[in-house]
Amino acid sequence: MAAFQPGSPDQAAFLEELLAAGLLIDSGVSGVYGRGSEFERVRWAFDGLVTRTGAVDAPEHMAFPPVLPRRNLEQIGYLKSFPHLAGAIFSFEGDEAQAAEQGQRAGRHDDWSEFQSQTELVLTPAACYPVYPAIAARGPLAPGGVTVDAGGSYVFRHEPSGDPARLQMFHQREIVRIGEPQTVAAWRDAWRDRSVGLLRSVGLEADFDVANDPFFGRAGQLLARSQRAQTLKFEVRVQIAGPEPTAVASFNYHQDHFTGTYGIAMENGGGTAHTACLGFGLERITLALLHAHGLEVDAWPEPVLERLQLT
Ligand code: ZN
C-alpha cells in the first residue's frame, strides 16, 4: 500500500477552506472528494474552453468509460512502469457460505479480499489509453493521421495524499495526436505555446518545463532520466497550495510505444506512426483558479469570467 503523504500546512489549510465552502465534499478517504455545484461549474467552463481552443485541429471526438480492459494495461507495460499507481477491479464469484463470511468480515471492516477474484477490468489510469486500440482497429492511417479529443474522462491513480491537488480520481482532459513522426512533433510544439497561453488567459501564472513520469523503483530512475534527456515529457505548472508549483497540464511524446504495441502504421508503406498526447488536469486547474481568484466565483475578475463564459 502506498504510504499516505500528508499535505503541507498550506495544503491542509486550502483543503479546509474548500470543504467549508462546499466546493469539495469529504468522503473520508484522502484524495477522493465529491464536488459542489460551483466547483463543477468552473470545471465544465474550463472543459469548454479546451474544446473551443482545440477546435483548431478539427479533432474527432471519442468518449470512454473510466474502466479499461485489463489486457490493454498489460500490453502497454503499465504494471512494469507504474505498479504502485494501478487500480484493478475485483468482484465476488463465490458461494453462499463465502458470501456470508465476507458479509461478516465487512460488518467489522475487516479484510474480505480473499473472497474477491480478479475481473477483466482495471480503472483507467490515463484518458488516452483506450484511444490507441480503437484507432488500431480501423487499420492503417491516411496521410496526416488523426487527432482525437478524448474528452474529460475520470482516471485513477493510487496515491492517497492530503494535498487537495493530488487526487486519486480526477478528470483528465486529453487530446491525442497520431500520425507521421514530424506531424506529431509539430502538433506538440504548437500546443506547448497554445496551452501556456490558454492558462495565462484565465489569469494563471503558468510556466512550462521538462518533466518525467513517476516511474517505479530503481529501474524507473533510469527510465525517468532517459525520458528527460530525450525531452519526451513537458509539464505546464501553476502555483496552487504546494511549496512547489503543481503540474496542471502535461505533454507526452510516446514515439512508437503505442503504435508498436497495437500495430498502428501509416497506409501504403508510409512508415511508422508516432503518438503524443496532451492532458489537462481539470480538477487541478479548477483548484488553481479558486486559489488565484478566490473561492467566490462570481467575484472573479471580469476578463477571466468572460474568457470562461461564466458571466
Ligand atoms: Zn495520454
Image (cartoon, helix red, strand yellow):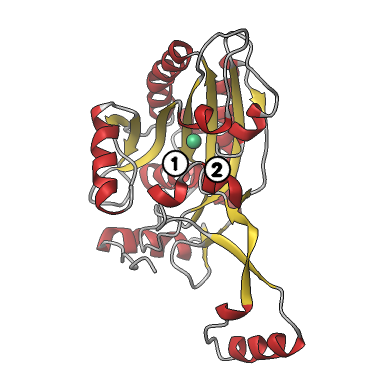
**Secondary structure category for the residue under label 1:** helix
Q: Where's the C terminus, which quadrant? A: top right
Which mark is drawn over residue 153?
none
Q: Please state the horizontal and vertical placement of residue 256, each as a whole percent of the image.
A: 45, 26
Q: Nearer the viewer, residue 286 or 70?
A: 70
Q: Position of residue 41 (x, y in %)?
A: 59, 45
Residue 223 versus residue 208 in the image, above or below: below
Furthest toward the front, the residue is 269
Q: Mark 1 Cα within 10 Å, few/some/many (few <14, many 20+)?
A: many
Residue lying at 60% horizontally and 28% vertically, measured from the top left: 149
Q: Are marks 2 and 1 in contact (CB under 8 Å)?
A: yes
User: Within the image, what quadrant is residue 99 found in?
Assistant: bottom right
The residue nearer to you, when weighing 174 against 295, is: 174
What is the quadrant of residue 237 in the picture?
A: top left
**Quadrant of the drawing holding the N terminus:** bottom left
Q: Mark 1 = which residue?
A: 285
Residue at image x 59%, y 89%?
105
Whether disc 2's CB lies below 8 Å from ligand 1 is answered no
Look at the picture and state if 16 lies above or below 276.
Answer: below
Q: Is residue 138 visible?
A: yes
Total number of numbered discs in the rendering: 2
Q: What is the CA distance from the residue labelled 2 to the residue labelled 1? A: 8 Å
Label 2 sits on residue: 43
Q: Is residue 306 visible?
A: no
Q: Residue at (65%, 90%) from the top-left corner?
A: 101
| Nearer to me, 218 or 155 | 218
Instruction: Name the kind of residue labelled 1 in the image.
Output: Ile
User: What's under tag 2, amino acid-wise?
Assistant: Arg
